[in-house]
Image (cartoon, rainbow, N blue to C red):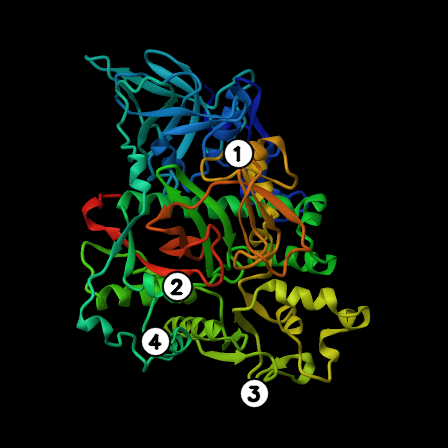
Amino acid sequence: MADRNERIERRFGEPLGTAPGGVISYSSDYKTADASVFPSRSSFRSYVNGIYMGYKWQCVEFARRWLYVNKGYIFNDVAMAYDIFNLCYVRDLINYQELPLHSFRNGALRRPEVGCLLIWEEGGEFEETGHVAIVTEVFEDKIRIAEQNMDFYQWPEGQDYSREIKAKVGAQGDYWLHCPSQGSTILGWVIQTTDPTHAVVHETPDSKALNIVAHVAKASSHSELPWLNLANDDESAYVDMMGGHFLAAQTTQRLRYYQITAAAKAALESATDELHQMFLHATDYALERPELLRKFGLPDTVLSKIKVSWENRKNQLITSRFDFAMSERGLKVYEYNCDSASCYMEVGKVQGKWFKHFDVKGGYDAGAELTRKLIKAWKVSDIDDVIHVLQDDDAEETYHALYMKSAIEAAGHRCEIVVGVDALRWGENGCIVDALGNQVKWVWKTWAWETAIDELRFDNEQTASRPLNSHNSTPSLSDVLLNNDIMVFEPLWTLIPSNKAILPILWSLFPNHPLLLNTDFALNDELCASGYVVKPIVGRCGANIKLIDHQQQTLAEKAGAFEHREQIYQQLFALPLIEGMYVQVCTFTAQGHYAGAGVRVDPSMIIGKDSDCVALQIDYEEETDT
């Protein structure tokens, strides 16, 4: 092989070489990326046949693209390349099935094979990320690999691999690969095979480990005593709303709590982090395609603002919540609430105090870390002035706003709560100020973005088109939230992943993903055969949802104010019925990462506004090292 110094260096996106199967490896020299060709984050996302491959032109993108083109399957999204070593399956997108993966450590008795994945541990030149390559040829004394993001040099003329790695066979037939990069370590190779002989054993949790178990706390004279601290504003407001020191409103649920295994908690944590990235991919995909954006039912003026928000504030998410069905049947996500997610206080504060008051042993609070992680998220935000918490005059929003205010202040920021918008006024130079004269620059809101969008939908044309700074009256909610000089949490782009129209797009990008449910914009034969759920693309608290079984019989439905909105159709996957209650697991995030979990329960199959939050505990007995 020619000396590296004699090779031709390529700019970002230029071909380095072509691997067996006709898959091109591209230069990932980001310093040379042409801004006119790659003007935005979305320009760096790679798709083949509408299926997301990865970030241009990283090592994971090449590996997934090579497997898809040559094998017809892909592995699920991973945070780091070295995480591939722990995957247990790939998804066959041709035959719609999962195929087993097995990992073999460097020095294993089973040698790497053509088409398998070679994995590096984090460290050395692959600090934090690790690395992955495709094995293209295997010999007694060496292997050849193809890859991306190792260097930016063109492969020698006529060569269909990036480099060779020296190998040596031990006395027992153990096959060892030299680590050619200083400070880096080859973990081993990952093969799609049904034969696990000599493979690393990845413990697969029993499906029953995903079952949720109901328990009842012991009642005593102590149980009737107050247990929330009324000197804390948020807890006092919560007690006022609940009419007492209760976590659950229903008397039958006030001593009830639920428990899951540590394996289930690990599955929820992994699913939350993976799904967040998947929803971001789907958001980016939709924003680049006008025909898909029309499915979301948003005004054109708002869509242009959403695109700007996405480009500027993609990573500025503080709170979001996933809703899951979880049982031994599997773990499936229903939807993503990343606009104005509720129940943070219940899970982050109240359920922990409930466990202490009722002296519940045998596990730990599933929301124990939520407040701490929320405070951390606020600490690293870009806020440089007072942040205003905007809420409606509603008892539930009041304690939620006060809880968030305490987290913001614990993070070191000044915070003011504004109830409604009547206390706001137009200041000099068209800015908006509060009753104390503070300019409104940063906002966290309990209102859904759709509330502000509805003001634009139903205003007359003259009102909707007037300049924001021309008002002589109190600014409206849309004047505040859609003001270019005000930064709002959660950002405007969260309208896209929170809209149910994202679900069919997600299914098209990640077909048959084990965490997803088949979803379409139109009812089809497959959904009729499985049973399906009708959901309005915009809705809250279970309103206007209808559950239909495979015999086309209505199992449950809930009325609401969204019957005129467009609908999507999602595969029926009912919540588990536990001790007479349907139980939904919710995971909560801080900056898009898992931060805690709780449950909501209801005697009906549809979780709604009045469904109770009940305490969730992780079983100590099942805890394992993760």
Q: Position of residue 354 (x, y in %)?
A: 27, 66
Quadrant where the image shows the N terminus: top left
Q: Which residue is mark 4?
A: 244
Mark 2 or mark 4, which is nearer the start of the sequence? 4
Mark 3 or mark 2: whose residue is earlier in sequence: 2
Marked residue nearer the N-terminal end (2 or 1): 2
Q: Looking at numbered disc 3 in the image, what kind of residue is underneath it? A: Ala
Image depth: mark 1 or mark 3 in front:
1
- The amino acid marked with disc number 1 is Ser
* Circles 1 and 4: CB atoms closer than 8 Å: no
Residue 121: which quarter of the image?
top left
Q: Identify the residue at image location x=25%, y=54%.
A: 215
Q: Which mark's residue is nearer the viewer, 4 or 3?
A: 4
Quadrant housing residue 75: top left
Residue 571 location (% of width, % of height): 53, 39
In the depicted structure, whether residue 517 falls above or below residue 461: above
Q: Which residue is mark 1?
A: 530
For marks 4 and 3 on the same chain, the one whose residue lies earlier in the sequence: 4
Residue 443: tell me if it is visible: yes
Mark 2 crowdedness (10 Å alpha carbons): few <14, some 14-19, many ≥20: many
Q: Which residue is mark 2?
A: 374
Q: Which image quarter is the C terminus in? A: top left
> Marks 1/3: CA distance?
56 Å
